[in-house]
Structure formats: structure tokens, C-alpha cells
Image (cartoon, rainbow, N blue to C red):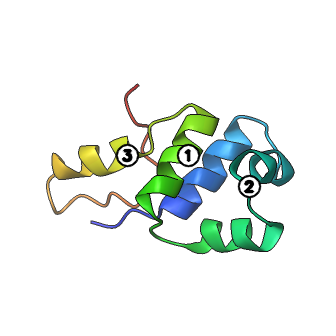
Amino acid sequence: MQIHIGNLIRDELRRQGHTNEWLMERIGVSERTLQRLFNKPSIDTQQLFLISSVLNIDFFRYYSNALSTPSNTDTSQHLTPSK
């Protein structure tokens, strides 16, 4: 089981039609920090909570869903969390 949260955040940002600058302003990070975040397979829970709030999506749900997924299923795919 592997979830790459940085990829999921970047993909959701694009899906919503927002720019990197839009997210940078709302979470208070530099462009370099945001790019590093997109490349990380995991991030701090406080930061994930802030990003979830800003993008209005529960990114924690990916982890919860993975707990109920059989271990032979590839959870690195872009799953859509239940709202």
C-alpha cells in the first residue's frame, strides 16, 4: 500500500482549476516549498489539515480508505475519497 499525498494534492489543485500561486497564498508557503510538498509521499498532519480545509477535500480519507482495502490492491492510484 502506497499513497503519494503530494501527487494527490497537486492533482486535486489542478482538478479544481487553481494555480500554485493560489494555494501558496492560502497556506503561506513559497513556490519552492510547494514544489517540495508535491514531490513528497507524506506530509505533516497539520499541513495536510490546512490543505484539506483550503481545497475543501478530506485528504485523510485516502488513508482511511486504504485501511479497509485489501493489501494486494494498489492504493497509489488516484482514488476519489468519499465526502
N-terminal of the two: label 2 or label 3?
2
* Secondary structure of residue under mark 2: loop
What residue is pinned by disc 2? 28
Which circle's residue, 1 or 3, is located before the other in the chain?
A: 1
Q: Secondary structure at mark 3?
A: helix
CA distance for labels 1 and 3: 11 Å
Asked whether residue 77 is in view, the answer is no
Q: Residue at x 40, y 36 (%)?
A: 81
Q: Which mark is residue 21?
A: none
Query: Which residue type carries mark 2?
Result: Gly
Q: Residues within 10 Å of mark 2 (few under 14, many from 20)?
A: few
In the image, is 83 to the left or to the right of 24? left
Q: Which residue is mark 3?
A: 60
Please state, as top left, top right, bottom left or bottom right, where the C terminus lies in the image. Answer: top left
Identify the residue under disc 1.
50
Nearer the observer, 2 or 19: 19
